Image (cartoon, rainbow, N blue to C red):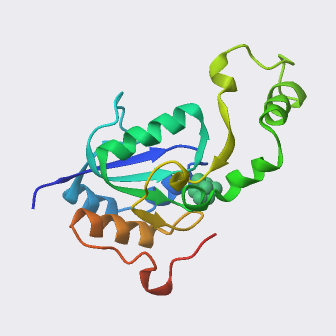
Amino acid sequence: MSKKRLATVWLGGCSGCHMSLLDLDERLLEIAKLADIVKSPLVDAKEFPECDVALVEGGITNADQVHEIQVIRQRTRFLVAFGDCAVTGNVLELRMRFSKEECLARSYIEAQSNVAGRIPADPDLARLIERWGPLHEHVRVDYFLPGCPPSPDLIFHVVSELLQDRTPDLDLGGKAHYG
Ligand code: SF4
């Protein structure tokens, strides 16, 4: 069996799901036998490449991520919502109690650590979208991998099964859970 192409992506998340991925420890070597990692926070690639499996951590919070997840969808065979933020919105939903303007004011005007006392003029900083939420609100998702973060056992099972052209058990025999 030829080697597959694996990508991992960090969008609107805290990186905790990727920390759990690193907790695969020596099982990362088994993944490396099955696939080349063609894009990840540790693998610099300016363009998102074609890949067989993409683990996408976090939900969608800004216009750049809306574009990015659409590109990922176009170039990915199996897109996996990686962790509760990607699956349900999870903690991102807490922001929805406040308007975009309130969030920007809190970050750039009210926060004690802020010295500028104003929202920066850089237009990129003002491109938050009104609704933050899970991936499936923007693109079709093939697999939903729950957990905050997902357990290393579940990550290994899902990734290794997909890389070997098998259908993973997303419930992991009743062991998978949200939160
Ligand atoms: Fe962080 Fe949990 Fe969201 Fe993963 S699911 S990005 S660990 S808050």
User: Disc count in the image?
Assistant: 0
Q: Position of residue 19 (x, y in %)?
A: 51, 54
Tell me if I can see residue 41 in this picture. no
Q: Residue at x 60, y 64 (%)?
A: 148
User: Would residue 112 be found to the left or right of residue 26 on screen?
Assistant: right
User: Would residue 147 be found to the left or right of residue 27 on screen?
Assistant: right
Q: Residue furthest left?
A: 1
Q: Position of residue 24 (x, y in %)?
A: 40, 63
Q: Residue furthest bottom?
A: 173
Q: Is residue 46 above or below residue 70?
A: above
Q: Quadrant of ligand 1?
A: bottom right
Say which quarter of the image contains residue 119.
top right
Q: Position of residue 28 (x, y in %)?
A: 33, 59
Q: Is residue 98 above or below residue 114?
A: below
Q: Residue at x 55, y 52 (%)?
A: 137
Q: Residue furthest top?
A: 121
Say which quarter of the image contains residue 153.
bottom left
- Quadrant for the N terminus in the image: bottom left
Q: Residue at x 10, y 56 (%)?
A: 2
- Quadrant for the C terminus in the image: bottom right
Q: Residue at x 48, y 34 (%)?
A: 67
Say which quarter of the image contains residue 178.
bottom right
Q: Nearer the viewer, residue 19 or 154?
A: 154
Q: Nearer the viewer, residue 171 or 72?
A: 72
Tell me if I can see residue 52 in this picture. yes
Q: Nearer the viewer, residue 28 or 111?
A: 111
Q: Is residue 4 above or below residue 38?
A: below
Q: Position of residue 70 (x, y in %)?
A: 43, 41
User: Would residue 57 be found to the left or right of residue 178 on screen?
Assistant: left
